[in-house]
Amino acid sequence: MVKPRSTPLWALQLSIAAGAVLAGVYAVAQTPASAPDAARDARMHWFREAKFGLFIHWGLYSIPAGEWKGQPVPGIGEWIMNHARIPVKEYEQLAAQFNPVKFNAEEWVQMAQDAGMKYIVITSKHHDGFAMFHSQVSKYNIYDATPFHRDPIKELSEAAARHHIRFGVYYSQVQDWHEPDANGNTWDFGPDDDHKNFDKYMTEKALPQVRELLTGYGPICLIWFDTPRGVISAQHPDRGQRFLDLAHQLQPATLIDGRLGVQGDYVSMGDNAIPNRVVQGDWEVPATLNHTWGFKKDDTDWKTPEDLTFKLVDIVSKGGNYLLNVGPTSEGVIPQASQDNLRAVGRWLKVNGESIYGAGATPFGPELGTPDPSRKDKKGNPVVVPLTDWRCTTKPGKLYIHLFKWPGGSFKLAKVSGKVSRAYLLADAAHKRLTVEQNGERVTVKLPAQAPDRMDSVLVLETR
Ligand code: GLC
């Protein structure tokens, strides 16, 4: 039995009761809201305030950068050892070449701050088994096995502390393609994972390395576990419990993500998977700026600042956090296009951050999209065709209407509960009052001809 540290937030079952679109609000089947839990609320407070974090995937895979022996390797960059079936003896030779002399923790953290990001999560050990920190458990790490001979996780954790940005680590607790008893490498240690002694790997490497991360790198805001596979699951809850117990014992405030394999502190959505409706509880969308987590030299299909800003607002308007990834190069440089696009979002947040940080989900719903009864998703529910003109985030007594498509003239809202006492544009430092007409729940706000922001103009409605 997994003993979660407090009232569990069970993974949400999202389903639309067939056709049950009630008054424009989607009926979302979800676990009954757990009674208010002060301890849980205290633990989750920073996460609910932060809303926007930086994910960093950095490791030996940044050297081949999507190509092996002159051939492009399809798929996400950090999986190159797996996708190209590179033998351990060949892949580990990359370590001798890894010397990211341009790495500068201060610059990376400053970029996160410029982007308006409030937490950082970096890969400390990914599926390839190579530790990006000075591990005493395994010499297969950046300090001992490379000419770089430094500990970037330590340098980043210290820089994050200087900038008051929370610091977390990604740790692949089940897959380790360097180890014969971990999951995942069936080309050196095949034919499958079933005959391996996973408990030996877990006890001799995974748990001791998680202990190192929780004892040597200051406050760790969260551990981002990944791909639990079957070996850590409801069928083997004891294994997951050992990771939970370790974290509870060493750093009780450290949050556990949704991919340990047993109950964590919040739900991790699928990669780049933004739900199409409001989701209750605490959750996070991990997402890429292009199509890969680890650096690939030929993937320059960057999401635009407009798209990134919309996604951030869209996720927050549904109740979640946005963990947006960069894949630094083998020299230790975050690609310039990544930096530029993230800084553009940061400039928007500098003006409009009040509508994001600590904000809650929309009270409306129809603005998110319309169900198309003629099309069913794999659960048999009507496919929701997303709408993108506007979104709403909330704080007590405030509605933040994010206008991506400037309506000009006026903006009309239905189903507004309470009286709108004031309306103004968040980007207007003077918060000059706009004319509001209200008839019951129907509200019309007169708007200037020009949108204050080309990406997202925020209209604030104060209600009482
Ligand atoms: C998937 C990939 C992994 C990546 C993660 C990020 O689990 O296996 O490489 O780190 O997504 O969400």
Image: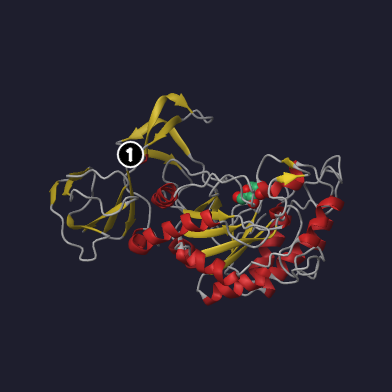
Is there any visible trace of residue 230 in the rendered image? Answer: no
| Label 1: which secondary element | helix
In this figure, what is the number of numbered marks? 1
Which residue: 75% across, 53% down?
A: 128
Residue 276 higher or lower than 306, as above or below: above
Q: How is the image coloured?
A: secondary structure
Q: Position of residue 166 (x, y in %)?
A: 53, 69
Q: Quadrant of the N terminus?
A: bottom right
x 78%, y 68%: residue: 147
- Left or right: where does residue 130 sit relative to residue 418? right
Circle 1 sits on which residue?
366
- In the rendered view, tell whether residue 265 sits above or below residue 447: below
Taking 305 as reference, is 100 left or right?
right
Q: Position of residue 423 (x, y in %)?
A: 19, 56
Residue 21: quadrant of the picture: top left
Query: Front-most of 444 and 376?
Result: 444
Crowdedness near tag 1: few (<14), some (14–19) or many (≥20) residues, C-alpha within 10 Å: some
Residue 276 horizontal/vertical position (percent): 44, 40
Going 33% across and 51% down the picture, which residue do you hit? 456
Q: Which residue occupies the foreground of this view, 136 or 211?
A: 136
Task: Name the quadrant containing residue 218.
Answer: bottom right
Quarter where residue 214 is shown: bottom right
330 horizontally vs 138: left or right: left
Three-letter code, disc 1: Pro
